[in-house]
Amino acid sequence: MATPHLDDRRRIGRSARLALLGLTLAAGACGTAREIPTLTVFNAAALGPPLREALRTFVDTRHRVQIAQENAPSLEVVRKVTELGQVPDILAVADEALLPTLVVPRFAQWYVRFGAGALVLAHGPRARYATEITTGNWWRVLQRPGVQVGRSDFRIDPSGYRADMVMQLAETFYREPGLTDRLRATIPDRNIRRAEADLSAHLEAGELDYGWTYESLAIAHGLQYVKLPPEIDLSDPRFADRYATAMVALPEPGGRAPLRLRGAPIVFALTVPTNAPNAALALEFVRFLLSEEGRAAIRRSGLHPLDRAAFVGRVPNALQSIADRRD
């Protein structure tokens, strides 16, 4: 597979943004801004909308909190911690596997699985063959002349490498030798974006016909989408063994050995780093996120909370009462 490379013109202004949310609520607030605790969140771009909604709801229930939320591809937010020495209060990723592989136990002692998802083909109102494409013919439509397909950069974004996994699974599911390479060929380098969240504007404008993304993001951005069979869309734990037959190798900086990841059901996870500046506040937010109110908040943005959150590692005392621990 050719190493994708981004269109610099498209990347202008797309660097990770630091968004300040939920400054002190006016009612009953007092003191200086310096005394207001700040909860710093580094999260996968795919988790931007649901966590933003959850954070806003959290602020509504807890006065005198401000939120600093940074959205970027999962591997970028992880490397801010592991390579650049930046320490947020919460680190949330779109692929659970990145935490035990790169973060735990050196930078954090535990993590919790809190959400699930599916990979879909999103499209805007101007997409070619939008009235024809279905779950039963999508792979044929994508190969038609002139159809423009996009995905995120698989080197840094799980949506990108999961798209490649889906292509691999499609080849065996549909019993079409060579289908993986033909589907890869539908995505020229110019159609690759830094993160899957960057695809939405291009789909809406008709610059791209179809884009690989999460169902939750398609819903959050108001895009139409085509659902894929559960045998290949990485949504169903019953097909975990099938998913594991797909594999990607991600280039690592500094000449290190590639990071090899196998297909698995899509699970979103987060942790509070060991040296988090406001760990107590972060744990309070985690408790809120896993509550019925927090689950309802992320559901409003299209993300499916797990029926029961599952903790891995050394669960903090503050979360023991809600932990369904699974090592």
Image: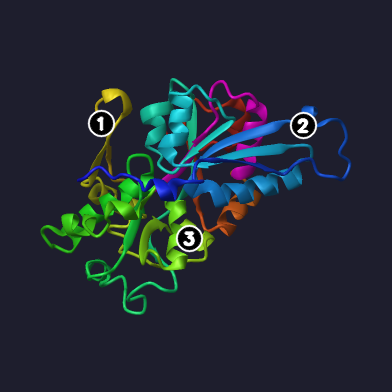
User: Looking at the picture, which amino acid does disc 3 mark?
Assistant: Ala
Q: Choose the circle earlier in sequence order: 3 or 2.
A: 2
Residue drawn at x 42%, y 46% is 267
Q: State whether residue 68 appears in this view.
A: yes
Residue 258 badge: 1
Quarter the C terminus occupies: top left
Q: State whether residue 119 appears in this view.
A: no
Q: Secondary structure at mark 1?
A: loop
Residue 201 badge: 3
User: Looking at the picture, which amino acid does disc 1 mark?
Assistant: Pro
Magenta segment: 266-289
User: Looking at the picture, which amino acid does disc 2 mark?
Assistant: Ile
Q: Secondary structure at mark 2?
A: loop
Q: Is residue 316 left or right of residue 104?
A: right
Q: Which mark is in front, 3 or 2?
A: 3
Q: Choose the circle earlier in sequence order: 3 or 1.
A: 3
For the residue pair 55 and 194, the one nearer the viewer reads as 194
What is the residue that sits farthest to the front in this orientation?
Answer: 9
For the residue pair 48 and 321, the one nearer the viewer reads as 48
Residue drawn at x 58%, y 38% is 322
Q: Which mark is in front, 3 or 1?
A: 3
